[in-house]
Each structure stands twice: as C-alpha cells, then as structure tokens.
Amino acid sequence: MQKQSSNHPSEYVKNMEKLSKLAGFIHQNSIVFSTLIGEIKALEKKLSDYHFQLKKFKRSVNCIEERTGHSKELTDFFESSSSESEVEKIVASKCNSKKEARLSQ
C-alpha cells in the first residue's frame, strides 16, 4: 500500500512554499539578467565608441606620418624636453617647403 503524502495538508503547504521560493528566485534571476543585459549593452556601446576613436586616431597618425615622413620618429612631450622645439622645427620646415612649392609654381 502506497502512502499518498501529496494529499496531506502539511505536504501541500511545504510544496507551495517550495514553489513560491522557486518563483521568487526566478523573479530575482530575471531582474539580475535584465540588469546584466543593460550593463552589457552599455559596455558594448563604450567599446564601439572606443573603436571609432581608435580608428580616428590611427587616421590622424597616418596623416601626420605622411606630412612629416615615415622615417621621422615622433617623441612624447614628457619623454623629451626638446620635443616642443622638434615639433616647431618640423612644422616650420613643412610650412617653408609648402611656401617654396607655391612660389615656384
């Protein structure tokens, strides 16, 4: 003879408590999940923005290298105290060469 515990009121209450806990966990998990999805989307947006900035920066660097020549090494301002004068020399030489090119036309 099998004992049917599911018909007993205390078992029914225990099962309902378990179901309500599970439902609560499901609700909590859905809140956490939606929060994490929002965070992931925000991070993807930041990554996309940084990628765009990197591409823009690379284009700027390529443009500067084309203007100054690929063989010249650009120094960091903090690495060299004379870097400002080096930049001024490069700019002056490029400006002078452009003026000379315009005058010779």
Image (cartoon, rainbow, N blue to C red):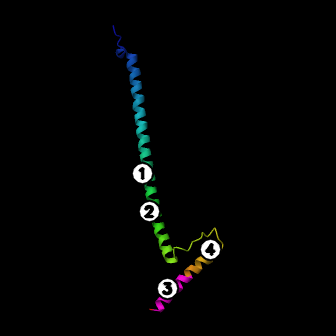
> Looking at the image, is 9 positioned above or below residue 23?
above
Query: Magenta residues: mostly which secondary structure?
Result: helix
Q: Amino acid at mark 1?
A: Lys
Mark 3 or mark 4, which is nearer the start of the sequence? 4
Q: Amino acid at mark 4?
A: Ser
Label 1 sits on a secondary structure element that is: helix
- State if disc 3 and disc 1 touch (CB < 8 Å): no
* Marking on residue 76: none
- Horizontal side, residue 77 vs residue 32: left or right: right
> Looking at the image, is 95 positioned above or below residue 36?
below
Name the quarter where the N terminus is drawn.
top left
Q: CA distance from mark 2 to mark 1?
A: 16 Å
Q: Position of residue 74 (x, y in %)?
A: 57, 71
Mark 2 or mark 4, which is nearer the start of the sequence? 2
Q: Residues within 10 Å of mark 1 (few under 14, many from 20)?
A: few
Mark 3 or mark 2, which is nearer the start of the sequence? 2
Q: Which residue was labeled with disc 3?
A: 98
Q: Which residue was labeled with disc 4?
A: 83
Say whether residue 99 is magenta: yes
Q: As rendered, which of 71 and 64 lies closer to the eye?
A: 71
Mark 3 or mark 1, which is nearer the start of the sequence? 1
Mark 1 or mark 4, which is nearer the start of the sequence? 1
Q: Which residue was labeled with disc 2?
A: 52
Q: CA distance from mark 4 to mark 3?
A: 22 Å
Q: CA distance from mark 4 to mark 2?
A: 28 Å
> Looking at the image, is 33 positioned above or below residue 67?
above
Q: Position of residue 63 (x, y in %)?
A: 47, 73
Residue beneath the point at 37% across and 19% down: 12
